[in-house]
Image: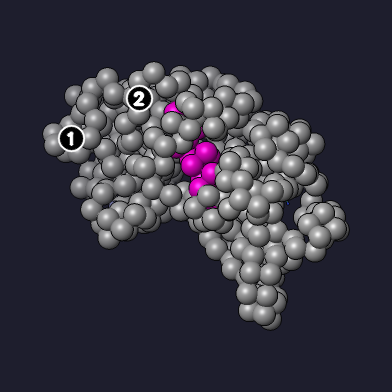
Amino acid sequence: MSTTTRAAVLWGAQQDWKVEEMSLDDPGPGEVLVETAFAGMCHSDEHVVTGDLPVPYFPFVGGHEGSGVVAAVGPGVNLVEVGDHVSMSFIPACGHCKSCSSGQQNLCDEGAKLFDMHMMTRSAGDVSHRIGDSEAARFAQLGTFSEKLLVSQDSLVRVEKDLPLDIVALVSCGVATGVGSAVHRAEVRAGHNVAVVGIGGVGINAVQGAAISGARRVIAIDPVEFKREKAMEMGATHTYSSMDEALLAVPELTWGEMCDSVILTPGVVTGDQIEPAMNLASKGGTVVVTALAGMLESEVQLNLFMLSMMNKSLKGTVFGSGNPRADIPELLSMYREGVLKLDELITNRYPLDDVNQGYQDLRDGKNIRGVIEF
Ligand SMILES: NC(=O)c1ccc[n+]([C@@H]2O[C@H](COP(=O)([O-])OP(=O)(O)OC[C@H]3O[C@@H](n4cnc5c(N)ncnc54)[C@H](O)[C@@H]3O)[C@@H](O)[C@H]2O)c1
Ligand SMILES: [Zn+2]
Ligand SMILES: [Zn+2]
């Protein structure tokens, strides 16, 4: 027995997404069949289109931000049951590896397999998703640009049923990563000056995370005016169109203190953005690199003398350095209590067949976040 579904897939880099019919096996041990409700259109899928994120195998099902309803469960599934509403975490959390058991689920050993052939297969090695005769790879072992998907229960976080499923989708990547970049990784505290560079679905949530944490000034930097306006609605206090413009104004604005933290969330981060970000940071300040660079990029411009003598830190982060099983329910609870604004994040909704239009709107700077509605 197998189920058929429709999914947006890539057959190679530099190509459009194509909606194809795909067949799924029945759930095996530990696996769950989910009917997708919403999929968020994160920039990370765009990296596969541009080739910045080279994937090992095509056809490749896009999407790693998502929500849905459990339709069937395989043997041994004990975390969800049929009818449960779920958020799909792009980092699986097995719960028992060293990282999971020490409060670093974002570094789960299962997650380390996301960039190899396990993107495609079940952990047992059998293929579960096929398009015609071809095995299909899936973004982050998910592939949420599909009406149905078969996933490990490790990738699912059960949520309360009265929460809107579009919001449940957004928290699974953009919100968790953005808020976490400010709260967990930059450790923003009351009174801090914080700069966020790049106001998309991730950066806007770093702005919110910094504001909620009590930052004195939240400086949002983006070349697109609409993004800067949106940032002011979501907690920013000042905006600039580039780091160069900010570097001229922030010394006076902060009475020479500069920024306790600088969070880099542009669509693509490049090595030449590190030096201006470090210069925006204060003595003892921190630069958090959240955005992805081309996978093979290894050149960085960085004054090492100033790094040590100004006691600065340069940190990467995956999933905002949070724990999906703790953070996703917590962020949803903050939304419910009105602490986090999440309805405001969705700029446009698209049917699956319009996925290419959605990504064109992302490239054109029209969306804070676009979502595919199933
Ligand atoms: N570390 C992680 O775990 C993680 C998780 C999710 C996404 N990401 C990455 O975060 C980045 C942001 O994702 P997104 O979905 O928010 O992207 P997005 O395309 O929605 O937003 C990017 C924003 O950056 C702005 N921008 C581009 N160049 C800029 C520059 N030089 N200076 C200032 N702003 C600039 C754009 O105008 C846009 O508003 C991507 O690289 C994505 O792959 C990382
Ligand atoms: Zn993402
Ligand atoms: Zn684990």
Q: Is residue 301 visible?
A: yes
State the residue in front, 122 or 78.
78
Residue 59 in view: no
Label 2 vs label 1, nearer the camera: 2
| Residue at the extreme left of the image, as rendered | 75
User: Which badge, 2 or 1, is on the more N-terminal residue?
Assistant: 1
Number of the label disc, if any, that sits on residue 160: 2
Q: Where is residue 88 in the image (x, y as percent from the top left)?
A: 38, 35
Asked whether the residues under the numbered discs 2 and 1 touch, taking CB atoms below 8 Å apart as contact, a structural biologist would say no
Query: Tag 1: Cα neighbours inside 10 Å, few (<14), some, or many (≥20)?
Result: few
Please give the name of the residue rendered at 22% of the width and 43% of the height, measured from the top-left corner: 126
Q: How far apart are marks 2 and 1 (CA)?
A: 17 Å
Q: Which of 190 and 182 is in front in this view?
A: 190
Res. 127 mark: none
- How many discs mark residues in the rendered view? 2
- For mark 1, give the secondary structure: loop
The N terminus, quarter of image:
top left
Q: What stretch is highlighted in magenta?
A: 168-181
- Look at label 1 and name its amino acid: Asn
Residue 353 in the image, given as x and y percentages of width and height = 53, 22
**161 or 110, which is in the foreground?**
161
When the figure is inspected, residue 134 is found, relative to residue 106, above or below; the finding is: above
Q: Looking at numbered disc 2 in the image, what kind of residue is underneath it?
A: Glu
Question: Is residue 92 rendered magenta in the image?
Answer: no
Residue ID for mark 1? 78
Res. 134 image quadrant:
top left
What main secondary structure does the magenta stretch of the protein show?
Answer: helix
